Image: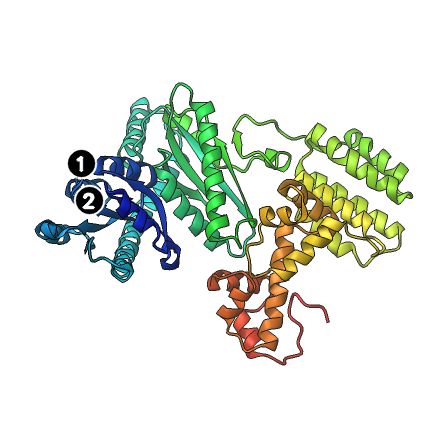
Amino acid sequence: MSFTVLIVDDELPIRQELRMFPWEEHQTELIGEAENGEEALQFCHNFLPDIVITDITMPVMDGLELFRSLKSEFPHAQVILLTCHSEFAYAREAIKLGAVEYLVKVTMDDRDLEQALQKAKEAALQAKALHRGEADRMRWEISKQLLQHYHKEEQSDAVADAAADSELEALFHRSLQVKPPFTLAALHVQSRKAGNVFLLHEIEEGLTLLEQQHSFTWVPADDGVYLLLFQTNSNHLTSLRTKLETIIEELYRSFDRNRSFLSDAFRLYFVISEPIRSREDFASGYRLACEKPVAIFYNSFVRVFTNQLPGTVSLEESIMNEIADKLQKAKWDREQLLRTVREDFAVWAMKYRIVPEELRAFVSDWLRDWLRENEIQEKSWKVEQRIANSCTIQELSAAFLYEIDSVDGKKKLRREIAEAKKFIAANLEKQLTLHVVSEQVGLSPHYLSRLFQEETGVSFNDFVTKTRIDKAVSLLKNTSLRVYEVANEVGIPSYRYFSAIFREWMGVAPTEVKKSYGNTRPLKGEIK
């Protein structure tokens, strides 16, 4: 875990000297500097550093005044004081009031700063744990109350309605610091089941860090859904869209920086409500925001949806025949069939916005018949699996193409995809996000993602994960490395996350594989 640090001192040489300290080696990140307490306080309002290292004697606002303001406004920030000999009395007083440590400028060396940082980190961890526990309890309690209001049956008595409105408004104002009109934005986290608890924990940590910076309040709403409440203003829709895009981008960047092995395993998007002005508005806004929009299947690169989304249509015979006729004409010419799927299928599906379940069933049935005509029966179960796992029209089209193109097992990978697979296999212990690999092979992340699925039949993330698990199995069987060392070797440094993913893919825990070395019984993910 990395802690953020702010330096506050009006002397440039002191700031320059502190810049040279090896912050990263001590799990810290220097995120800013300020020349006085007033400037530092403004910085804290925007970026919430974990640790503030401040001089005592400064112009405008001195260190002690800054310290008192920090304890009042940001009680979880830890303060290290820089002092001269003449300021000892003030420094000792500040320690009594809660400063972590004081350091004498003229004699301070790296060792002194290391020890002070260690104290500050330990205090920050403890403060965060206490705050997180209480904050989590409060958020879940508020979530429960909101859900009760949402499920509460409509009452015909006007007096009772007025009382319910008043009760809900008081909850918004007292616990959520908003008052009507406000807007609900539901953050949806789309991910695989395994490791989901770790992903959601990181999302919640990220939302808590961003909460003050972007002026919202969040509470859990459902499994993988979080409600963010924003005060509505005159230009709320445009400004809110921009803010939500920024929040998603910052969450993704945080994962790339701190949990790269998770960063491509999920998708984030928002659904926003109309402005909430009453209990009736809340009930409808809550429902529409928290429901997964069908449009997500056809708009896989959109990050912010409104609740005014186009619907889907059932796959009637006349609509089906439009694409079925083209497929029928091309089915005996492999290249023509591939062109039909690549150029016509997705366009046709998006034109009508067919119900995704019905579209998947159509593709599955068509491929099953086509494979039967080609006398290839043993692939049917794989077809069903790939089609059923397609979450977007792009993934479904890619799966469709892959099954046709690899029917005889002679499919040749494009050079970029072959290079991507080779790079992944050689760098499993490193960050392997779409952005990292796409730079290596000279493609955009979006294009690599689509092409990878078309060429290999699996998503980029599934391929990376499976390759890591395969190497982990080999290391567990053939080396003396401990399980946590194996996890590090394959690029999943979180032991708990590694165990969860390993169990999902292989059907057993990594410790069981280690214990049963030499057992000839094949694992779930192996073919013998």
* Quarter of the figure that contains the C terminus: bottom right
Amino acid type indicated by mark 1: Pro
Q: Are marks 1 and 2 in contact (CB under 8 Å)?
A: no
The residue furthest bottom is 518
Label 1: which secondary element: loop
Q: Residues within 10 Å of mark 2 (few under 14, many from 20)?
A: some
Q: Residue at x 64, y 34 (%)?
A: 298
How many other residues sit within 10 Å of disc 1, few (<14), some (14-19) or many (≥20)? few
Placement of 486 over or under 178, stated as above or below: below
Q: Earlier in the sequence, mark 1 or mark 2?
A: 1
The percent coordinates of residue 211 (x first, y second) are: 36, 39
The quadrant in which the N terminus is found is: bottom left
The label shown at residue 59 is 1
Q: Nearer the viewer, residue 393 or 252?
A: 252
Vertical position of residue 322 compared to residue 7: above or below:
above
Q: Nearer the viewer, residue 110 or 150?
A: 110
Image spot of residue 320 (x, y percent): 78, 33
Task: Please tell me the numbered disc located at residue 71.
Answer: 2
- Residue 180 or residue 488, whichever sits in front: 488
Q: Position of residue 264 (x, y in %)?
A: 56, 49
- Percent across and percent down for residue 254 are 46, 46
Separation of marks 1 and 2 at Cα, in angstroms: 20 Å
